[in-house]
Amino acid sequence: MIYFRKPIEGIERPQMEADVTIVGGGPAGMACALRLSQLIDKHNRRYPDAPLSKENINVLEKAREIGQHCLSGALLDPRSMDELLPGWRREAPLDAEVEHEGVFYLTKKKAHRLPITPPPMRDHGNYVISINRFTKWLGEKVEQAGITIFTGFAGSELLFDGDRVTGVRTDDKGMDKANQPKSNFEPGYDLKSKITVLAEGTRGSLTKQLVGRLDLDKHRNPQVYGVGVKELWEVPSGRIRKGEVIYTLGWPLTTKEYGGSWIYGSKDSIVSMGFVTGLDYADPRLDPQRVLQQFKTHPYIAHLLEGGKMIRYGAKTMPYGGWWSMPPLAGDGWMIIGDGAGFLNSQRLKGIHLGIKSGMLAAEAAFEALLANNFSAAQLKSFKEKVDASWVKDELWEVRNFHQGFENGLLHGLFHATLQQLTGGRGLHAIYTTEAGHRRMKHLDQLPADGGNRAQLLGKAKGDGKLTFDKLTDLYHSGTKHEEDQPSHLVIHDTNICNTRCVVEFGNPCQHFCPANVYEMEEAGDVPHGKSIHLNPSNCVHCKTCDIMDPYEIITWVPPEGGGGPNYDGM
Ligand code: SF4
């Protein structure tokens, strides 16, 4: 029996009032808080007799410490930071400025360098950063500005009055596996808020609730995603230059899967490397963690890492759908910013600068709403107007059809991308449509039993313990920890489907697409096919792949008790 979180009914919950609650303390949420604080400071200097208070502006962050759950490549385009905090370079944790780039097409044995680096991959002037250290630093700025950040608090549900969002309920703490209160039980707060800003990152759980309840994905392309699986390596000095950026296409993926790698030379001979696999592949046995392991065995990559040591691991999904997949950005009492809304340029593989800018623009809309004392959709729609009038729209408009062009494989994709480049992003059609990635997964009986030319991508990696690793070894390097005695935060709505249909039709792809070994099929006597689903929720690195890629859409990721999750450092 799998238990899952159900809010306890009929208990008294503490109430708190807020003007603005920002759910999620990543770069977008922090930028929103900081910009709002700046605007209030400016207003209060100008109108000392009619000051606005910052006391009732809060950030909720599910991690125990700011930045602990943040993961990215990460390369920072400095554009939005220049607007948010002039002079920020002097104090921000920047590991290296990009000075060299190369793009390679890999075949099984060879690495072919493209003679010219395509303009979107040119990164001169960008910075190699650790996103979790950078976010921690941003969080310090927010706290210095007088805004409260509640760490270790997850938003478990949105509060509504009709279709108006009126705030957030935080997670109950101290529940046991059977969803019963323990002796240390503390009910969550009802944080009543005039404006709730959802900054939860990719596939946020509250954002998903809101999109579902208000039908926000109607008349839009479905959002599509990729999962980036990352390792941090310490390599012998001189192996890669500080500030060197390498991107690869091709092997080990076939021309039918979407994805590629990044390798960033950081300070102190640290290399950030990872592989992004598009979550729209056909073969349910494909395992993105294995794709990264396989990639490292390429002679070009293996040589780079030889004699080095893997020191950190993690994974995260990212939204690829672009402009046509973005939901409405604001409504009665709410706004959505950052990855949760799809602010990411999939052609450049960059979203931090867009997330930050989206947070800043949402802050400007929130500030105007506070002045007008009006939190309606009609007032908050100014957020979308600000996005439309900013460079964010210019950047995303240019690539509005980019990812969809690759739906039929690499060669079609390169054709469409070239055409789009020549037509300001249009290509063959005004709007390239798409379908949700999990719908492209095929039944096992439609695929070659031995995997055909994808065999190297399928099944779990075993690892040699030096260059390549199995999932549990990798996972150990993510620092992931959860309270064991709590309800599962992975909710499978019908485990019969796992044990009867999925086992036959898809071979339980959750075992493969989860990069943290959360899902296992165990031998069992009392089920028709002798295997039954078993979960290890404590392993979860909060990447959200399962919520996105499950072919029956029966997995829902909900936040575990606040504070649990990966402990990323330097990622
Ligand atoms: Fe990612 Fe889901 Fe696995 Fe957690 S359980 S690591 S969210 S795929």
Image (cartoon, rainbow, N blue to C red):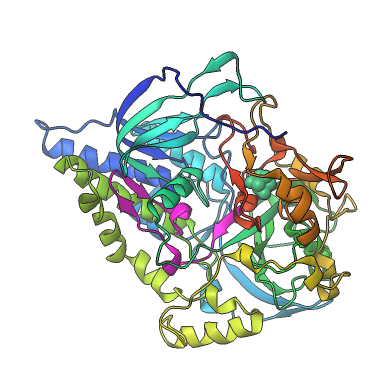
Can residue 57 be found in the magenta stretch? Answer: no
Can residue 335 be found in the magenta stretch? Answer: yes
Q: Is residue 215 visible?
A: yes
Residue pushed farthest left? 49
Position of residue 317 relative to residue 493, above or below, is below
- In the foreground, 129 or 474: 474
Q: Residue at x 88, y 49 (%)?
A: 465
- In the foreground, 509 or 425: 509
Side (left or right) of 414 relative to 230: left
Side (left or right) of 451 relative to 95: right
Side (left or right) of 126 relative to 520: left
Q: Residue 84: x, y in percent?
A: 34, 50
Q: Residue 178: x, y in percent?
A: 66, 25
Q: Residue 531: x, y in percent?
A: 85, 46
Q: Quadrant of the N terminus?
A: top right
| Range drawn in magenta | 315-342
- How many circles with numbers are drawn on the protein? 0
Q: Is residue 235 visible?
A: no
- In the foreground, 340 or 188: 188
Q: Residue 102: x, y in percent?
A: 64, 73
Q: Quadrant of residue 549?
A: bottom right
- In the foreground, 174 or 395: 174
Side (left or right) of 195 relative to 338: left
Q: Quadrant of residue 564?
A: top right
Position of residue 185 relative to residue 92, above or below, is above
Q: Residue at x 16, y 41 (%)?
A: 371
